[in-house]
Image: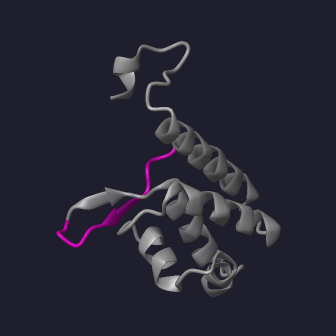
Amino acid sequence: MSEPTHVSGSAGSRQRLSTAGKLLDAIAKQGEPKLEEIARYLRIKVRRLEECRDGICPLEPEMQMRLAATVVALGSEHKRLAYALYAQAQAALRMQQEPDRSHKYYPRERFR
């Protein structure tokens, strides 16, 4: 089991990176595709991607899905993480749209 990725917050506390943050961090370390190129495809500022990568501000589920689709379309070697992000964001949107929906097999209390 891998350790969770953490980033130092502005108050000195440790914040856990989101799946989108992990994906952006991996892309930034590899250098391809460039964050600028991804931002251009998403029509957002590079700063938003950098803030997500650094654990400062998460992306909305819709933007996470667009990010994942962009990474796959650009042929990045991080497709597996992009698919995981897409599925996670899709599930988050479903839960937002159907707040009374619960998991079939686990008690609702386990998800609070």
Q: What residue appears at the point 66 percent right and 84 percent down from the top-left corner?
A: 40
Q: How many marks?
A: 0
Q: What residue appears at the point 48 percent right and 15 percent down from the top-left corner?
A: 106
Judge from the rendering whether residue 112 lies leftward or rightward of residue 17; answer left or right.
Answer: left
Quarter of the figure with residue 31: bottom right
User: Residue at the left extreme?
Assistant: 11
Q: Is residue 33 visible?
A: yes
Q: Nearer the viewer, residue 77 or 84?
A: 84
Q: Position of residue 19 (x, y in %)?
A: 53, 54
Q: Is residue 55 above or below residue 16?
A: below
Q: Position of residue 39 (x, y in %)?
A: 61, 81
Q: Nearer the viewer, residue 10 or 65?
A: 65
Q: Quadrant of the C terminus?
A: top left
Q: In the image, which residues are magenta?
A: 1-12
Magenta span has 49? no
Q: Is residue 92 above or below residue 7?
A: above
Judge from the rendering whether residue 6 lies leftward or rightward of residue 23; answer left or right.
Answer: left
Q: Position of residue 66 (x, y in %)?
A: 66, 63
The majority secondary structure of the magenta stretch comes to loop
Q: What residue appears at the point 44 percent right and 32 percent down from the top-left corner?
A: 99
Q: Is residue 1 visible?
A: no
Magenta span has 5? yes
Judge from the rendering whether residue 53 lies leftward or rightward of residue 40; answer left or right.
Answer: left
